[in-house]
Amino acid sequence: MAIQRTDGRAADEGALLALRGISKSFGPVQALKQVDLEVRGGELLGLVGHNGAGKSTLMNILFGVTSPDRGDIILESQAMDERYGPALAHRLGIRCVFQELSLCPNLSAVENALIVHPSLEGTGWKRRAKSLILTRLHEIFPGHGIDVQTPVGNLPIGQRQMVEIARAFTESNNLAKVVILDEPTSSLDSSAAQQLLRFLQRTVLDGKACILITHKLTEVLNFAQRVVVMKDAGVVADVSGAGLSRERLFTLMGSVERAMVTPEASSFAGMRRVDVVGNTGGPSELRIEAGETVGLAGLAGHGQKEVLHRIYAASRSGRDKGCRVTGSAAYVSGDRQREGIFPLWSIASNITIASVRSLSRGSFINPVKEQRLAEAWREKINIRSKSVLQSILSLSGGNRQKALVARAFATDAEIILFDDPTRGVDFDTKRELYSQIDSASRSGRCFVWYTTETDELFLCDRVYVFHEGKVVDSLVRSELSEERLLQASFHEA
Amino acid sequence: MPLAIRRLVAQPSFYATAGAVLVWLVIVAHSHGVGGGAVISGALNYSVFFALVGVGQMLVMASGAGNIDLSIPANITLAAYLSSGQMQGANAGMAAGFAIGLLSGVIIGLANALLILALRIPPMVATLASGLVIESFCFAYSRVSVAKPAPLLVSFTTQRLAGIPLVVIAAIVASAAVIAVLKRSLFGRHIFACGQNMTAAWLAGVNVRRTRVFAYVACSTFAALAGILFAGFTGGPSLNMGSEFLLSSIAVVVIGGTNVAGGQASVVGTWSASIFLFLLLTMLNVFQVDPGLKNVITGALIIAVLALGKANRPQAQ
Amino acid sequence: MANTSRRYAENAGSALAVLMSKRSTLSVIALVLVLVAVFWMRPNIARYNGVRLLLNLSPVLIFTALAQMFIMTASDIDLSIGSFVALVNVIVAGIASPGLAAAALLACVAGYGLMGALIHWLRLPSIVVTLGASFVWLGLGLMVLPLPGGDVPLWLSDAMRLRPPWVPAPVLVALVAMLLGHLILYQTSFGVILRGVGSSPAALERAGRSTLRARMSLYALAGICGVIAGVFLAGITTTGDANVGRGLTLLSVGAVIIGGGEFVGGIVSPVGTVMGALVMQLSGSLLSFASVAPAWQYSVQGGILVCILGLRAISWRRVVT
């Protein structure tokens, strides 16, 4: 794979950190293939790439949470051996801000700061840890207003993220030399995000290095000095940030072609399926008609999931006055581990669980019919396995997700609720899913689709943009543009 | 290891069954091959009550991590008193006695489910509390009534058909029904879905609440049934007749290979474990092991079986 | 100067806030209610000797509950603590040689730590391991002292009869227990790690901390509290009985939960736990004062448990929504 390199500096010279030929597989999935990366002091490095490109694995390896199958981690010109782990990483000045956050929810911000600084222990640790974390919070997020004594589990997600970020920059005996931030702004509002990015710019001036992993290309384009692009488990480009254009970055990342599904006027127009009034509170109310594909956009954690849950609950109980649902609904979660698969079961049982009721007489399930149904959907949706009787865990992530989609499609539900179903799914699988969605909506099913990938919104007939739990904008496909989405997401009307 | 053996070992009920067979062999060897059948028959006659209670506890534990019924001992005692009190030592009251005993079981199950689901009290504490309340009823009832099981019930629990106690045959039929329900019915599917992941189960269209209520009601009904029968077996209820069942009901479920974290259960394993524990005690008695050491060995074996099973079974992530 | 005094006020305020945090509030209210009821029914108990006798046995449940609390800090549960306390009781009463007895007690604590390590290494469910351990402790107890009896060292039973000035000994014990528990879990940096392991072991590992050591420490602390409870039991009853621990286990779980603890998430309150233990202990006396028939005393105890937890569930739900 040819790596495009535009800065000609010699490798290793003054590098705080270097990776050489790192490879890693998880079962059938190759997460990283022969990755090389250097980070120099005084550098703000942007790391971009689509979901599943290997960014998070790379970061876990850097931090010693996962060990690579092959390759070397070199810190300050010294190769690390198998003892390399988070404890050593901390001592050597490597810090991480994890996407799913790594704070203990029952501990306060002060106590969470203590955990990463063994040298603070002894009498007076509370005072020392408090001043440490408060100093950084004030420095990075002036006017943050966070109560550092309350358990962080009680703080809103944005404040939790600020605490996690500030903690990564605290220094005792353990210095922070290389700080890796994975989607640090995903739960921050725009002003806090700007505060953070400006701080990153300032802080690298005194010799630190920061790696910024983000989906928001604007952040990378405006702030990073160097940009590394990952795709399909490898580094495909390593370019200077100066003068980099959005279009070029898009090309390097290999973005999804937009005009994949030809827009077609819905032939079921007028038949209302979902009607959410009140509580969404914004200028627009949420309406979904048969055959329609509706996207829910906005920053992560701004109420999209809650609306999906509300529609689902209303379809089950019908007691929600503010949410009228006609027909039944099926739910597909992208959080396979926590909300999707039943790990002890076969692929077949995982597919049929939502539709076994219709396969049973009295309350006993007809096993022949059940297996036939599972087989049929395995073929239809192209799940790659020898038999549907194998354990669901024998499948790769993408195929597990297909099984979950099959579960929803196998029901007679008229409404399919998608909760970011293509999270961490490879490109081919996505393309297959898109065509499945397309053909299903032609047969009258409607889709409510929450996605964190902007490209997928272009497949929707209509997009509702969420901000702080409310619908702030509603766009039909022809009005859709990335700028418009970002504007609405940050509520910058 | 050959595949067939590996498959066998991977069965949840393997260790309990192997243990039972092993202990039985030791007992038979000790008596120079005499009375092996009698040992089994005797073990069955006693362990059937533990198996019945265990199957109920198993349903609750399979319905998800943290689910447990600690009200079982009091429940057993109350059902025993109510049924025997109704029978008054006469065969005429037998049907009514069974009905009233089982009804108390159903009501207790509903009450437990109410505390756990409506008041959101953790199952362990909710059933502990309900157990205390039920115990009061037992005390109060034992004072005011003459409780004596019907002669027919007494003979049912001790009579044998072809060497197998009648009550065991009945319990095996009931257990077979449970196996069928778990394997083939919607309820079985739903309970294991809830047990693996309640959120996923809800999102897959399972009525999680109803399933959990069913599990608790089934559990307490099984315990009540065991109580009614046990009163017949021992010739009449007593206030502490249930206490033995508290820890052993959990032990037989776990040794039998049911996943404590939920989502999977083994009826056969629960039976095997009940027989295993009884035979183990018989063996230790045969060897005249002192009561202290007997307990130590039992405890160590519970932990060992769990550790072995954990090491040899494929793990969910 | 003004600054210092304000800081003191703030500290006092935050200490009060910790004491009165939402989690232990209910146990405070419950304890006050039970106490008021007891004193109202038996006014002459409200003096030094009355309280001393009323709370005579409470140190046993208090330390048993603290032991359970340490285990629950790790999001585990201990079904063996009752028989462990009984084991300690018979060791104290049944082993005459002080050196041997002390060694045996040390071995007990080590055994608890190892149990924690076993649970951690093999990722076994604590509920079953401790269930098995409960048979082991009971068996060891029976081996030391097959029948109830034995002799408790004189100095120990004398110590139980100590009458400190002003404050009756059991109250003093309760206060010391609260303070110690609070200091260990909430005032030391080590306590932070201990609580962290119960809520997010992954976060601790990522911070380079050993979760094995934290888990073992919690179990060892539980072992120490169990030993203290057993020594109190021996001193107060001046006899040993391996079967005495049956009811203690479940009462200890109740005390932790009433005190605002949770089964998962490393959320516990030492102050609340001690009060919860006192509530459980006193409600028994209260019922006998109220001449509730012995048969119904269990019922009322269960009812109290349900009321407290039901109230808590309802009030928290309101906070959440």
Image (cartoon, rainbow, N blue to C red):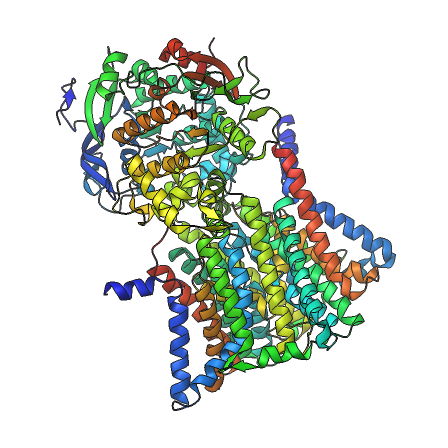
Number of residue marks:
0
What residue appears at the point 39 percent right and 44 percent down from the top-left corner?
A: A350
**Residue B232 falls in which quadrant of the image?**
bottom right
Residue extending furthest front?
Answer: A361
What residue appears at the point 15 percent right and 20 percent down from the top-left corner?
A: A5
| B202, B27: nearer the viewer | B202
| B295, A175: nearer the viewer | B295
**Residue C239 falls in which quadrant of the image?**
bottom right
Please state if B189 lies on the left or on the right of A53 as rendered: right
What residue appears at the point 76 percent right and 68 percent down from the top-left corner?
A: B141
Asked if residue B264 can be seen in this view, the reply is: no
Estimate the x, y position of residue A241 in percent, counting from the top left. 25, 15
Estimate the x, y position of residue A257 in percent, counting from the top left. 26, 18
Estimate the x, y position of residue A121 in percent, counting from the top left. 45, 43
Q: Quadrant of the N terminus of chain A?
A: top left
Asked if residue A252 can be seen in this view, the reply is: yes
